[in-house]
Amino acid sequence: DVNGTFNRLNKKVYHEKNMGYETWWYGLGTPERYQHNMKDMYRMITEVDEACAQIIQELERQGILNETMVIFTADNGFLTGEH
């Protein structure tokens, strides 16, 4: 239940006059929005996976993969109601 997820959030932080609420409602307020945004998220993850693979392949091609530290960071900026 998407609305149930919002109702469990801290009301001091997430309320109707808060930008977080608007962002949450836009992204997850209906089952259709939720599905659309989850599909977009998985598309984006796939693109990141492909880009990382290309970087690793290029490092291998140049013969410097074993001398290279690859650091990947990200946040959970999808506001899916989970951590």
Image (cartoon, grey):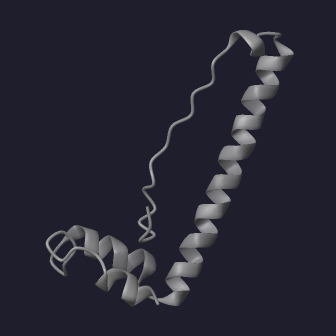
Percent from the top left, x then y, of residue 67? 71, 9
Percent from the top left, x then y, of residue 73? 51, 37
- What count of labels does the image hold? 0
Percent from the top left, x then y, of residue 5? 39, 82
Quadrant hosting residue 36:
bottom right
Left or right side of 30 for 36: right
The structure residue drawn at horizontal position 70% and vertical position 39%, both measured from the top left corner, is 51
Quick one: which residue is furthest to the right in this view? 61
The structure residue drawn at horizontal position 57% and vertical position 27%, both measured from the top left corner, is 71
Left or right side of 23 for 63: right
Q: Please identify the quadrant where the C terminus is shown.
A: bottom left
The structure residue drawn at horizontal position 65% and vertical position 62%, both measured from the top left corner, is 42
Q: Is residue 65 above or below residue 52?
A: above
Quadrant hosting residue 10:
bottom left
The structure residue drawn at horizontal position 33% and vertical position 81%, both measured from the top left corner, is 6
Quadrant hosting residue 21:
bottom left
Percent from the top left, x then y, of residue 13? 18, 69
Left or right side of 9 for 15: left
* Along the viewing direction, whichever of 46 and 67 lies nearer the viewer: 67
Left or right side of 63 for 43: left
* Along the viewing direction, whichever of 66 and 47 lies nearer the viewer: 66
